[in-house]
Image (spheres, rainbow, N blue to C red):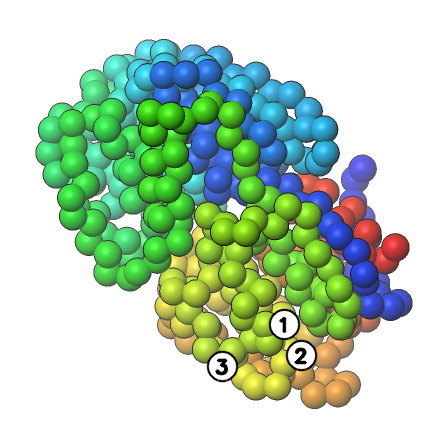
Amino acid sequence: MKLPDPLAIKPLAKPPDCTITVPGSKSITNRALILAALSDKKCTLRGALWADDTKVMVDSLQKLGFEVKVSPDPVEECNRTIEVVGCDGKIPAKKAELYVGNAGTAARFLTALVCLGHGEYTIHGDARMHERPMKDLFDALRSVGAEIRSSENRLPATIHANGLRDGNIEILLTDSTQFASALVLIQGHGGFGLSHLNVEVQDPGYITMTEAMCKDFRHPSFRPDYAIEPDMSSSSYFVAAGWITEGQVSVAGWPHDSLQVDGKFPRFLPPPPKISRTRHLGDSVMTLAICALFGKQPMQLVDATRMRLQETDRIQAMVTELKRVGVRAEDHEDGFTVWPAEAGQLHGADIETYNDHRMAMCFSVLGLKVPGIRIKNPSCVNKTFPNFFDKLEQLRR
């Protein structure tokens, strides 16, 4: 169903009391797809997210010659059961053109994957993806034999692959931990080592996730039937909705010990005076900023410079749109500060989303409390959560 643009979000008439089913984790789904393709088994991924970012990954694997079968999920309409026949580190196709949209995980993981092949592979995305950094990953792969041709070390890129030689890779993590995760995913299928990762800015959550999944998939007793956790970044919107409205909202299947850093989101309610994007939470720091408007103290986000390089400059975007609804907010180089709103301070506005799914979703949560919030380009949620607005309506039941 086509959504109105802008989409009006009506405040809840009463505090919600419900349980919501959230689609699978994008981060886990795309890592699992790569690991399944690299394995020597036929792997079944259950509860896999079916949204723009994972569709481009599946499409790319199929273009690379992997046998991938997609079936409906019995519980969640935006999940799928995906079967992948692994080729034990080999890339079946000798030539392919891969489109990744604005999916950073797909862009970085596929770049590393095709370097294991023998042939010519072109990777390109949308305009924003062509602005996002790739240099550190390109340089790391070049250091062990990959030939990567690219203008200004960004996508689009053409990789002339002939496998990867022995060597030791050092990589900076200042721009994206996805670079390191991409290398961890293919390690063991090339001769290179990763004995030293130059971690200038610590961000253990996503790299730790990658390492844990690699250990699972490569363990001798691994059963090739893998369950994907619900997406904890997406879950944060519903936890936040319950908190700001003083209701009770649960997320079905919340993992006891999540692989995802945003599984810790409830621990940070009410919002603390300082939150780190690299030490505490992932994308849910944006949701926490919405909650801070209803807290008792200012909240400062720090260690968040990389947010300027994501789907949009999220630091600038958050501060701009928070000010649009009457919030006192200030940006700084590596984050921003928001202050609690006083009675009558917040008001409605048309929210620019900058084609960023997380901007649309976190300001929709605000609209459950503040009248007059309208979301521009609401369909941008298709990137990771196509039925988000249907789930939001379930809070009214």
Compared to residue 347, the image places residue 194 above or below, namely above
Which image quarter: residue 178? top left
Instruction: Report the disc number at residue 291.
Output: 1
Disc 3 on helix, strand or loop? loop
Binning the other alpha carbons within 10 Å of mark 2 as few (below 14), some (14 to 19) or many (20 upward) gives some
Q: Inspect this view and state whether residue 369 appears.
A: yes
Q: Which residue is mark 2?
A: 294
Instruction: Report the disc number at residue 281.
Output: none
Quarter holding the N terminus is top right
Residue 21 x/y as whole percent:
71, 45
Dot 2 or dot 3, earlier in sequence: 3
Which image quarter: residue 236? bottom right
In the displayed structure image, the side of residue 269 where residue 123 appears, left or right: left
Q: Which residue is found at the position 88% from the left and 67% from the top?
A: 13
Q: Which residue is found at the position 77% from the left and 68% from the top?
A: 247
Residue 87 x/y as whole percent:
36, 14
In the displayed structure image, the side of residue 248 where residue 93 appears, left or right: left
Binning the other alpha carbons within 10 Å of mark 1 as few (below 14), some (14 to 19) or many (20 upward) gives many
Camera-side residue of 293 and 89: 89
Disc 2 on helix, strand or loop? loop
Residue 133 x/y as whole percent:
34, 47
Which image quarter: residue 51? top right
Question: Do labels 1 and 2 touch, CB within 8 Å?
Answer: yes
Q: Amino acid at mark 1?
A: Cys
Q: Amino acid at mark 3?
A: Pro
Q: Which residue is mark 3?
A: 273
Residue 136 x/y as whole percent:
25, 45
